[in-house]
């Protein structure tokens, strides 16, 4: 979206939707069912997008070798591990992570809505994950047809900011110098299928 950081646009969308959701009469069963339907439709669209991307990945079946150094777990003193895989396997692994993340979001929303009776997040979660799906690297490459270069070059850069730091610390390194250093030190090197 015009080169603006997706985290900034998410914040703007969330703040805007919070103001809108204050004016929506969620106590009206028809309105509540409409918002629920929008949430379900949003998730069905996301799953359809991911299934299409999966079909494209399997259709292309790019067996180009991909080497990168996976960062060590946060708090660990050991160095990163060398991973040797294919573009097809890497994309499939990344897509599996996207499916898992979407399922976790639906689970959290189900608990918040069904158990705690929160209704406002339904509206926000109908839009933010859908926006996030279209901003994902795999969707940009396999659905929108953007070339896998620059920011879309594999291995993909990790999530920035606080969440990126909490999920694994360092950044995945795909540069030749890091790969050669990992090969020399004998860290990893096992081929993942």
Image: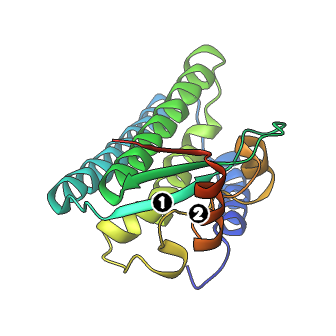
Q: Where is residue 97 in the image (x, y as percent from the top left)?
A: 47, 41
Q: Residue at x 47, y 28 (%)?
A: 29
Query: Dividing the picture into quarters, in which one does residue 57 lie?
Result: bottom left
Percent x, y of residue 4: 66, 79
Please name the residue shown 60% across and 71% down the image. Answer: 175
> Is residue 135 among the parts visible in the rendering?
yes
Q: Which residue is drawn at 34% across and 49% down?
A: 89
Q: In which quarter of the image is residue 75?
A: top right
| Mark 2, secondary structure of its residue | helix
- Is there a contact, CB below 8 Å, between mark 1 and mark 2? yes
- Please, which residue is most extreme toward the bottom here? 2
Q: Where is residue 95 in the image (x, y as percent from the top left)?
A: 39, 47
Looking at the rendered structure, the secondary structure element under dot 1 is: strand
Task: Compare residues 42 and 26 and report the one nearer the observer.
Answer: 42
Identify the image's colour scheme: rainbow, by chain, secondary structure or one colour: rainbow
Is 163 situated left or right of 190 in this image? Answer: right
Above or below for 42 versus 12 = above
Residue that carries the numbered disc 2 in the rendered image? 179
The residue at the point 63 percent across, 21 percent down is 117
Q: Position of residue 69 (x, y in %)?
A: 60, 55
Where does label 1 land, which residue? 67
Residue 35 visible in the shown view: no
Is residue 73 depicted above or below 89 in this figure?
above
């Amino acid at each position: 979206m015009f080169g603006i950081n997706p985290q900034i646009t998410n914040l703007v969308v969330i703040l805007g939707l919070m103001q809108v959701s204050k004016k929506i009469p969620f106590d009206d069963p028809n309105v509540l069912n409409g918002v629920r339907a929008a949430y379900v439709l949003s998730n069905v669209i996301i799953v359809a997008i991911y299934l299409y991307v999966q079909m494209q990945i399997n259709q292309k079946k790019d067996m180009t070798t991909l080497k990168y150094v996976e960062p060590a777990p946060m708090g660990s003193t050991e160095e990163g591990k060398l991973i040797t895989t294919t573009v097809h396997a890497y994309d499939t692994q990344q897509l599996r992570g996207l499916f898992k993340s979407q399922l976790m979001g639906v689970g959290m929303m189900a608990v918040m809505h069904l158990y705690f009776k929160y209704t406002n997040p339904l509206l926000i979660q109908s839009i933010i994950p859908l926006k996030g799906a279209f901003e994902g690297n795999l969707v940009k490459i396999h659905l929108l047809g953007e070339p896998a270069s620059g920011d879309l070059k594999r291995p993909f850069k990790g999530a920035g900011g606080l969440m990126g730091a909490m999920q694994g610390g360092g950044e995945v390194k795909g540069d030749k110098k890091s790969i050669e250093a990992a090969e020399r030190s004998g860290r990893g090197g096992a081929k993942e299928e």
